[in-house]
Amino acid sequence: GEIATMMDVPITKVIGTCMSLGIMVTMNQRLDAETLTIVADEFGYEVQFITTDIEENIEVIEDNPEDLTHRAPIVTVMGHVDHGKTSLLDYIRKANVIAGESGGITQHIGAYSVTLEAGQKITFLDTPGHEAFTAMRARGAQVTDIAIIVIAADDDIMPQTKEAISHAQAAGVPMIFAINKVDKQTANPDKIKEKLASMNLLVEEWGGKYQSHDISAKMGMGVTELLEKVLLEAEILELKANPNKPAQGTVVEAQLDKGRGYVSTILVQAGTLKIGDYLLAGKNHGKIRAMFDERGHTVKEAGPSTPVSILGLDGAPTAGDKFNVYEDEREAKQIAAKRTQLMREQSVRTQKHITLSEIGRRIALGQFKELNIILKGDVDGSVEALSDSFSKLSTEEIQINIIHKGVGAITESDVLLASASDAIIIGFNVRPAGNAKALAEKEEIDIRNYSIIYAAIDDLKDAMEGMLSPEL
Ligand code: GDP
């Protein structure tokens, strides 16, 4: 309706044009940028987009290469429950002591940095698991540089191990395998490496590209060597940032402390944060009154890859919110107000994620090149059969990626992964479990359920040809 008025043409003509493009619309429907451009072009208009991006007031200045300096890697620990993620994080926290400091890290602030003997630093996110990792990614925050995948050597590659691997891969984050619990009599690290090999994840000692190390998180065996491998991987990544500019980064966690007010742990990713800086994180803002490190010590400055907890914000931002520093307090407040309003409006926002029935149109518009699918089924045989058949449907125009497949119900973590990677979920004889369905509705993730293999394949084929009618 709005664009028809702007172009001064009858609404029915705009609707007609949309239909000829294969898009069924009503006069109140909002069109995406691509469609708007094409529709306007049909009537001889050119569209110019004026940004209403909430980040518009953030100056994006490209760093000069000579201003960039080395920064420490940021690491997340993932893996199946009880395989030893917490034990590993605890051991590293307690064992590593900065020269001249006594005792380990006693505070839990959501992230911590350790310094190895040769002086190199590594920063760990202290909320283990791929759910936290992907929840942040679904909010647009990618903070992890390297993922350590912990696998218990007395167990097997478990469903959540597979999930962790898929989540790291979908994020494009390099993995290092920590084969844990090798102190146990029943440990069989070779069996784990064999299983990994069968998943196309060949470890380095077997001639592959994945680093792995046998450890005992409980005894601390092999942990130093594991961390050295983390540093090696970091070297390859050439992690750099410019420390000489106003800080930017991501919120790791935040809470209301009875005595101190709102305490937020943030991870500086570029620039340097100083006491007195005016900071905006999500829709919260304030002047930094105090900063503390993971040892509870006051710090005055925090550079790239440094986690600090800060006092002074007017509320608790959400994990995954990005933060920026502003010179002008008024400007920060204006943006905060705008964001609050935008978030309110977004509750009635238009579809954000891809759906099966929309694929054909997006392909026709020419900018949709990859379809990400998460595949869950009741038995391994059908999951593999479907995964093979789906992959074979890839064409020159569109590549089909099975970013995660597994046996079992559709979980919240599947939905988060779909949200972070703009994927659709296909369930074969399985349904969403627990809160997965509600979360999928909130995140607007398309979940399709099938019980006949060829019906699933036919639907996908039809969708790719733009022939699939929307599911009602
Ligand atoms: P998470 O669920 O992955 O965080 O696993 P936890 O770190 O909580 O460990 C689960 C259990 O395994 C605990 O009882 C740990 O004490 C035990 N565990 C962890 N690492 C080791 C290890 O290296 N050797 C042995 N024997 N037990 C371990």
Image (cartoon, rainbow, N blue to C red):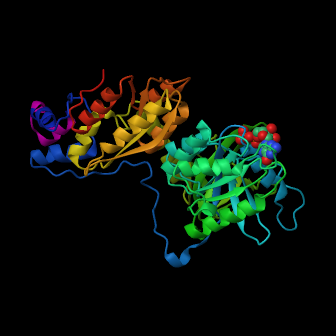
Q: Quadrant of the N terminus?
A: top left
Ligand 1 sits in which quadrant?
top right
Res. 220 in view = yes
Where is residue 331 drawn, in percent x and y? 50, 53
Query: Given the current orientation, which residue lies at the most extreme top position?
Result: 472
For residue 443, side relative to residue 175 (left or right): left
Q: Is residue 3 magenta?
A: yes
Magenta span: chief secondary structure = helix
Q: Quadrant of the C terminus?
A: top left
Task: Answer with the quarter of the image where residue 16 lies.
Answer: top left
Above or below, comparing residue 81 to residue 69 in the picture: above
Q: Residue at x 53, y 29 (%)?
A: 408
Above or below, comparing residue 87 to residue 72 in the picture: above
Above or below, comparing residue 71 to residue 425 in the picture: below
Task: Answer with the quarter of the image where residue 237 lies.
Answer: bottom right
Q: Residue at x 84, y 51 (%)?
A: 219
Query: Given the current orientation, which residue lies at the most extreme bottom position?
Result: 66
Q: Which residues are magenta?
A: 2-12
Res. 125 in view = no
Where is residue 471 drawn, in percent x and y? 30, 24
The total of numbered circles placed on residues is 0
Q: Is residue 415 magenta?
A: no
Residue in the foreground of this view, choosing between 75 and 61: 75
Residue in the foreground of this view, choosing between 455 and 431: 455
